[in-house]
Image: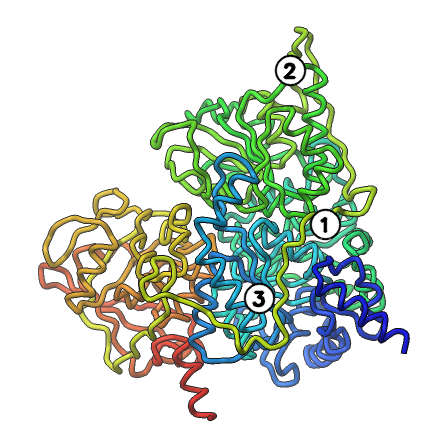
């Protein structure tokens, strides 16, 4: 049989290390198209998606949004699932799981604890978070491989044993790898990183989650998600000039703020969509995480088809064409909210500092900065990251740099470039973009997250020195990039970063202002233009993927009991059946408290696989309302002020339960579940806030904590750091039923307030069992 021989030949070739996407059309036939080049036996099942959509459409009897089609198309039981936007919990069957190395450690440790032999769905690990930017790509990568050898070995062997694909360090940032290889129209993918929504640029529903959620999916258990609302963003007009896809999400962030998308999927539609490249759509979806959105998505169109073809997946595009009616919204579908943006009128934006929703037109930022006292001189410009590191992004930045070089100019600011993947790095090297960016003064960093997540050994300033940086990243929280709380970070498009780095100041507007060339003559930068995809094929670069063996049962996974980087997990204690009485308040947080404040990244990333060690960063960035300081809280038992983690450990040692009081949108930002694991590990029981970010609230539930919200937000002011709290009525803990909180003041007086929660019945069982993982084991024991 000739086709069988051909497939056999190519499979043999692939096992020899040749990149699969060169032969994908041979491996995939019309009836059965592989989900990726790396899993030829796992096929896209649009028929099932279509069947589920039809069942739900008949039940709801109304047109469906694209988001609803993909989400409801993955229901575990579409015939019986209760569906009400913003209310009911959906039980879903995602197609695949992706994990970055910093979160994969804890996810795989939890999966090992489950006792299961192999993952139930295609899953991958991506090494991108542990590479520190220091002196340049090759040196930094070598250093990371040496320093993190124990962790990389753990992830590689755990992947081999449990059937998980492993992308080695240097392969690139998880979201770029997913876009190039794994996302496709109609896919449902969950990833242990908050910027997983990047895959929405290829028409998929890609959602950021904590590791415990990933374990559920890898274990073959239906995954729960509160039925999302759908916010429609109608795009009209056409992008042109200096305006870019990044400006769309910067504008949307300014409109919706950092919590305006919470509990909702952002669905872009309208005639303006077709003026945006596929990778541009990914940029927009990526940064949707900064407005709290569950995810973001674009409808399948010709730009996606073009990208699929260029990345060796024309077979997927052909199949998507056949099922296109299910990969776009129905005519007449209803959104919970609609925002309209005319791309023809959209101006370049720059957002910040300290929060990604503080939006300014680039034309205004210089004057605003001077008025606010922000430094206008730019110390460093940084382009790349998972948000903006596509071939088109690098091309537009190179187009700006080339103009400066033609006039004898280089960047006045330091300038760094982070390629999104090995494929992007190799291709921009071949096509000359990388050299142009070096010539203008740029330093090309490793294919990794780097400064975007705080992996930056910054030497040009001292900590505490007030300064400004501009980046094409997605997040700019206080201290995020360089651990300096005085760094004013602004996010914008790569081409604007490049122009501002050449000028060296926020007061430069490339649309109207002139630069002075080396010859003394003034010139104006022209709006950049670049190809969205290379004219030649992508250069795949080095092969950095490790296939899991067919049978990994004999693979040994080593975790040394004396390791300072890795630690096997011990089960959390079960609920004792009693009310939580007389809890101390570890800290009452003032203002914004992101997951960076709760569990800092940067140098702490090395402890992501060791729960006890990383717990030494618990809430060290949060501001204590009692004294206005970070990492300084009163020990209620000794009356001495000390670090937050030390105080929590003391309470745990003394057998005293404690709570945290938070403000609005508590836990926004990263998906890191360490921000939930750490308080649980150190004896925390309850987190009470005005509101939670979606991922963090779920992570807290998964680890057996009680995330509760004030029924009356003004009650936040009734609780003082010196009070004691009791949560009563837990014996009758039930969905939709508020819990009573008794506040005991030091003078002997008491107040009673009500606290709301979003627990459903199965989530209450997580609390009672001590964690979701404990509950999974209970159910396994019952069924065996």
The image quarter containing residue 551 is bottom right
Closer mark to the observer between disc 1 and disc 3: 1
Instruction: Locate residue 501: give its quadrant.
Output: top right
The residue carrying mark 2 is 515
Of marks 2 and 1, the one in the foreground: 1
Q: Which label number is shown at residue 228?
A: 3
Are there few (<14), some (14-19), or many (20+) residues within 10 Å of tag 2? some
Within 10 angstroms of label 1, few (less than 14), some, or many (20 or more) residues? some
Q: How is the image coloured?
A: rainbow
Q: Residue 370, percent across and down?
A: 46, 22
Element under label 1? loop
Left or right: 128 as drawn, with respect to 737: right
| Percent x, y of residue 304 | 77, 54
**Other-residue count near label 3 (Cα within 10 Å), few / some / many at <14 / 14–19 / ≥20:** many
Mark 2 or 3, nearer chain start = 3
Judge by depth and name the residue closer to the eye, 334 or 679. 679
Please name the residue that numbered disc 1 is placed on. Answer: 540
Mark on residue 462? none
Mark 2 residue element: strand
Residue 311 placed where, x, y %?
76, 54
Q: CA distance from mark 2 to mark 3?
A: 48 Å
Query: With respect to residue 435, does 756 lie above or below?
Result: below
């Amino acid at each position: 049989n000739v086709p069988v021989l051909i497939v056999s030949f190519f499979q043999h070739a692939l096992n020899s290390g040749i990149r699969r996407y060169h032969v994908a059309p041979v491996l995939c036939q019309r009836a059965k198209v592989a989900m990726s080049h790396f899993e030829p036996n796992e096929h896209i099942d649009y028929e099932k998606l279509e069947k589920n959509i039809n069942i739900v459409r008949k039940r709801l009897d109304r047109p469906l949004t694209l988001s609803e089609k993909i989400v409801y198309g993955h229901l575990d039981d579409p015939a019986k699932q209760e569906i009400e936007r913003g209310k009911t919990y959906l039980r879903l069957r995602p197609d695949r799981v992706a994990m970055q190395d910093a979160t994969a450690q804890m996810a795989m440790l939890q999966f090992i604890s489950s006792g299961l032999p192999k993952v139930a769905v295609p899953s991958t690990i991506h090494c991108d978070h542990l590479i520190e930017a220091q002196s340049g790509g090759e040196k930094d990568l070598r250093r990371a491989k040496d320093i993190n050898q124990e962790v990389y070995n753990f992830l590689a062997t755990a992947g081999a044993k449990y059937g998980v694909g492993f992308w080695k360090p240097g392969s690139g940032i998880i979201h770029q790898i997913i876009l190039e290889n794994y996302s496709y129209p109609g896919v449902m993918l969950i990833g242990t990183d908050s910027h997983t929504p990047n895959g929405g640029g290829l028409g998929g529903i890609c959602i950021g989650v904590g590791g415990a959620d990933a374990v559920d999916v890898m274990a073959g258990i239906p995954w729960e998600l509160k039925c999302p609302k759908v916010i429609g963003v109608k795009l009209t007009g056409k992008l042109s000039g200096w305006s870019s896809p990044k400006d769309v999400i910067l504008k949307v962030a300014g409109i919706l703020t950092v919590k305006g998308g919470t509990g909702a999927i952002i669905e872009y539609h309208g005639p303006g969509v077709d003026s945006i490249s596929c990778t541009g759509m990914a940029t927009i979806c990526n940064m949707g995480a900064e407005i709290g959105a569950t995810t973001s998505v674009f409808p399948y169109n010709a730009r996606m088809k073009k990208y699929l073809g260029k990345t060796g997946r024309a077979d997927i595009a052909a199949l998507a064409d056949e099922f296109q009616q299910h990969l776009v919204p129905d005519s007449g579908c209803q959104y919970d909210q609609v925002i309209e943006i005319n791309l023809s009128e959209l101006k370049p934006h720059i957002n910040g500092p300290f929060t990604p929703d503080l939006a300014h037109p680039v034309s205004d930022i210089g004057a605003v900065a001077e008025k606010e006292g922000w430094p206008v001189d730019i110390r460093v410009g940084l382009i790349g990251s998972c948000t903006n590191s596509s071939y088109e992004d690098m091309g537009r930045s190179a187009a700006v740099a080339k103009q400066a070089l033609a006039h004898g100019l280089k960047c006045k600011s330091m300038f760094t470039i982070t390629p999104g993947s090995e494929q992007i790095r190799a291709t921009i090297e071949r096509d000359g973009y990388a050299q142009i960016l070096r010539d203008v003064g740029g330093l090309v960093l490793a294919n990794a997250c780097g400064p975007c997540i705080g992996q930056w050994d910054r030497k040009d300033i001292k900590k505490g020195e007030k300064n400004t940086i501009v980046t094409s990243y997605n997040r700019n929280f206080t201290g995020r990039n360089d651990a300096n709380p005085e760094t004013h970070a602004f996010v914008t498009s790569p081409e604007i970063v490049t122009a501002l780095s050449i000028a060296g100041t926020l007061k430069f507007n490339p649309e109207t202002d002139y630069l002075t060339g080396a010859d003394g003559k003034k010139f104006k930068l022209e709006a950049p233009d670049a190809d969205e995809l290379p004219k030649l094929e992508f250069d795949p670069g080095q092969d950095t993927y490790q296939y899991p063996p067919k049978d990994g049962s004999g693979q040994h996974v080593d975790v040394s009991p004396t390791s300072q980087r890795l630690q096997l997990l011990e089960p959390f204690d079960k609920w004792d059946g009693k009310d939580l009485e007389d809890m101390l308040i570890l800290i009452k947080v003032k203002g914004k408290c992101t997951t960076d404040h709760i569990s800092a990244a940067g140098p702490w990333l090395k402890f992501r696989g060791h729960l006890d060690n990383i717990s030494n960063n618990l809430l060290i960035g949060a501001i204590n309302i009692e004294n206005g300081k970070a990492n300084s809280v009163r020990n209620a038992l000794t009356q001495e002020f000390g670090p937050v983690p030390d105080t929590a450990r003391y309470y745990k040692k003394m057998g005293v339960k404690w709570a945290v009081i938070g403000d609005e949108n508590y836990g926004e930002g990263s998906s890191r579940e360490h921000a939930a694991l750490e308080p649980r590990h150190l004896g925390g029981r309850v987190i009470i806030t005005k509101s939670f970010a979606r991922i963090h609230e779920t992570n807290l539930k998964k680890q057996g904590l009680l995330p509760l919200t004030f029924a009356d937000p003004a009650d936040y002011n009734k609780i003082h750091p010196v009070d004691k709290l009791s949560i009563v009525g837990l014996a009758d803990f039930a969905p939709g039923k508020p819990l009573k909180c008794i506040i005991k003041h030091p003078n002997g007086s008491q107040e009673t307030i009500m606290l709301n929660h979003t627990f459903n019945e199965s989530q209450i069982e997580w609390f009672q069992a001590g964690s979701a993982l404990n509950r999974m084991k209970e159910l396994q024991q019952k069924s065996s």
